[in-house]
Image: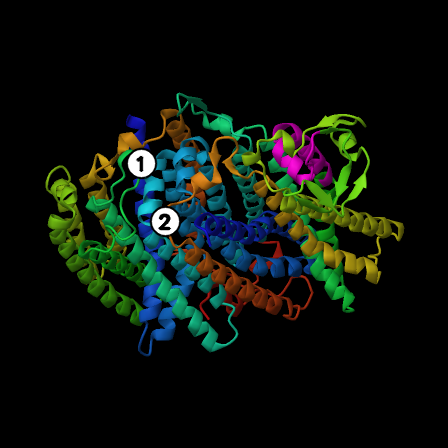
Amino acid sequence: MIVAYIVLTLLWLSVIVYAALGGADFGGGIWDFLAFGPQAEKQRRLVGRALGPVWEANHVWLIFLIVGLYTAFPIVFSTVSIALFVPFSIALIGIVLRGSAFAFRGHAAAVTTSKFLGRIFSTASTITPFMLGASAAAVASGQIRAPAGNVQTDLWTGWTTPFALTIGAMAVSLCAVLAAVYLILEARAIKDTVLEEAFRTRAIITGAITAVLGAIGILLSQSEAPLLWHGMLAHAIPIVIATMVVGLCTAAALFLRRYQLARILMLLEVAFLLGSWGVSQLPYIIPPDVTVLNAASPSLTLLEFLISTVIGMLILLPSLWFLFHVFKGENPVPRVQGKGSEGQQHHD
Amino acid sequence: MANILAARAQMGTSLAFHIIFSVLGVGLPLLLCVAEGLALKNKDATWMALTRRWTKAFAILFAIGAVSGTIISFEIGLLWPTFTKYSGSIIGLPFALEGFAFFTEAIFLGLYLYGWDRLSPRVHWLCSFPVWISGAASAWFIVSANSWMNTPAGFEIKNGQVTGINPFQAILNPSTPYETIHMILACYVATGFAVAAIYAVAMLRGKRGDYYRKGLLLGLAMGAIAIPLQIVSGDFNARFLASAQPAKFAAMEAHFKTETGPPLLIGGFADPATGQVYYAIEIPHGESLLVNGDLNSTIKGLDAIAPNDRPNPLPVHLSFDGMVGSGFFILFVGIVFWLLYFFRKRVVPANRLLLWGIFLSGPLAFLAIELGWMVTEEGRQPWTISGFLRTQDAVTPAPWLNVSFLIFSVIYVLLAITLVVLLLRLARKPLPNLQWPLAETDEEESDEMVGAK
């Protein structure tokens, strides 16, 4: 059924967008944690300013992924809910603590409270992507067995292997690179060259770490995720090579201080990385028992989901563009004193 | 704690927590839209100050609602994977639609909360419209999914297999119009009276300015328009349940025996072991009259339901009567207030008794919502999908659910305490100088909101 593949692609795109936007949010928390030196406070303020208007909108991609799986591939949702109960529960606790700590921190009266909430925020920002990365590796490893939708693995299978732990760590460092690249541009928007350079350094270092962890992951996959390994070498090889090439170009762009380009390349890198994973696994969603076709909902459901998504995107994408236009980029809409209450100005 | 009990306890606690923020997420945006509209139209600094203050409160509430909503969407899978396996293709769609509505609300709320200085006043006000419209739409979608659990539709069972799945039919199942309207009205009742309650407290403490008057009036306006509609909706809902879900109806009315011309039982403890109701106030033929307009109609009791399929009338009946009682109290308070207001030619009545009544109505309205959900969820037991999937068969095989329940309960308690502390602190902030144009949100205030202090 072609519809099943179209919906799957859509859901995969939402994983990519979540990684690109939500991942940067997690990365912001990581840099908040790692802020040190005389610039630490300024770094934290930059993170806060960047995250403020957009973090709730960013995390809705995760919800879309969950409800999308629930509607279009319910067996996948129910299987991972059982097999990955532990990492998902931990990731969930992280998401909760993170969101609330961030919301509360701005109102903390005492500096110690603010610091405490900050610690919660940044710890949770590290744990959640790690768990999500390890969960992804568990799925890719083929160790989750669920013939006819009946889960047969125990609670620890798949996500506690060296391969899974490596991918978990890679997820964390990927979030860190993403955030660092965005923060370079945020620093530029407020014309702070010291911060710009600080985050450039961080981006390069964590980029290198991510690449190393990725290489270790690929090596480990030979023994611990053979289906993935073979898929990468076979039908996914063009994407895998493209991922490496884009990664090198991103590093080059960072070195040459071409930051706008670096951001675009970084987003492409995330897309190709996750694309490699998805394509390597085809036709399985949860190898080896759950395939695209045996997990898909009937075509009427898929079609209605697809149509709803298209209509939803027609409303959402322009709205999202407007949000980012007002607050982000090299030229966000300027703040104007006295604008909020006169009722006489006509700037739109 | 047995696994299924822990799972139900965790889900119930999560929902009871989340509903508070969902309700405010539907009601507050409408208040903001009206208040800011009045401010701009009349160049009124007081309405603008109220808008600004409510906006700050809403920023915190929305964030907590977003995380608690994320928990729910995970928990549906983590706690009830068998439910998700069977129901996803049928009723997953409204969850996706709710996701879009919530996403839209989040985007425009981002613009509204942080765009005071960057958008023109008119554009800023226009951004409030998608917020309250999406909020109401979200409520509609989610409640349609719950409606489906009560009166399933949009599929067939042939040879033990689910076929003929039609998601639109599933969304438009028989309960949807009743439940959705009832919940959306509940949001407006509760938000309106909760906001009014805050200003009633201020007035009980002697504060009498225009600011408190207007806050009280707008909250009461929304609440008092919604509550009579809600009572009527409740009546329609109950009558519908008598035919569509007779087991739930019998439990909520503590109606053990099928009989002709049954009395209305107000309050009382329904003991399933003895089949008796203790300490209830009986109104002869009341039940029969309410349901069918006839003193001697026959109404099914719990005895008409197979023993394994009966919900427990003890909590269901008490919850139902608690909800209805709260609703009537709130209606009474609303009527008294508006009668006095108009008789005294638009002077806000400052009668202490009345202000206490308004103050109580705020939390009572939220209590009514929690009790109402108890009725509909407990009253549907032992089913998760009425007539198709039992709750005991829907739960996850994963162990340690009592640990999970404990952790999340602790998180909810901590969140609630922090929230109350923050909101009280916000409420105690001194008011700005109430002159038009209102003093700008300065850099420090905005920094506060982004957590960059």
Q: Amino acid at mark 1?
A: Gly
B62 left or right, relative to A218: right
Magenta-drawn stretch contains B381: no
A174 left or right, relative to B17: left
Q: Secondary structure at mark 1?
A: helix
Tell me which residue sits at (31%, 36%) in the image: A149
Q: Main secondary structure of the magenta part?
A: helix
Q: Residue furthest right?
A: B343
Chain identity of mark 2? B
- Residues indicated by labels 2 and 1 sit on the same polypeptide chain: no
Up-down relation of residue B310 to residue B49 (above or below):
above
Q: Amino acid at mark 2?
A: Ala
Task: Name the spot of residue B234 as percent of width and height, x first.
Answer: 69, 38
Chain identity of mark 1? A
Asked whether A90 or A166 is in front, the reply is: A90
Tell me which residue sits at (56%, 44%) in the image: B135
Tell me which residue sits at (41%, 46%) in the image: A63
What's the mark number on residue B378?
none
Q: How many marks are shown on the rendered structure?
A: 2
Quarter holding residue A235: top left
Tell me which residue sits at (32%, 41%) in the image: A79
Please give the range of residues in magenta. B231-258
Task: Name the spot of residue B118 as percent of width and height, x first.
Answer: 50, 56
Q: Secondary structure at mark 2?
A: loop
What's the mark number on residue A149?
1
The residue at which mark 2 appears reads as B398
Q: Residue furthest bottom?
A: A38
Task: Name the spot of residue A264 as percent of width and height, x first.
Answer: 26, 51
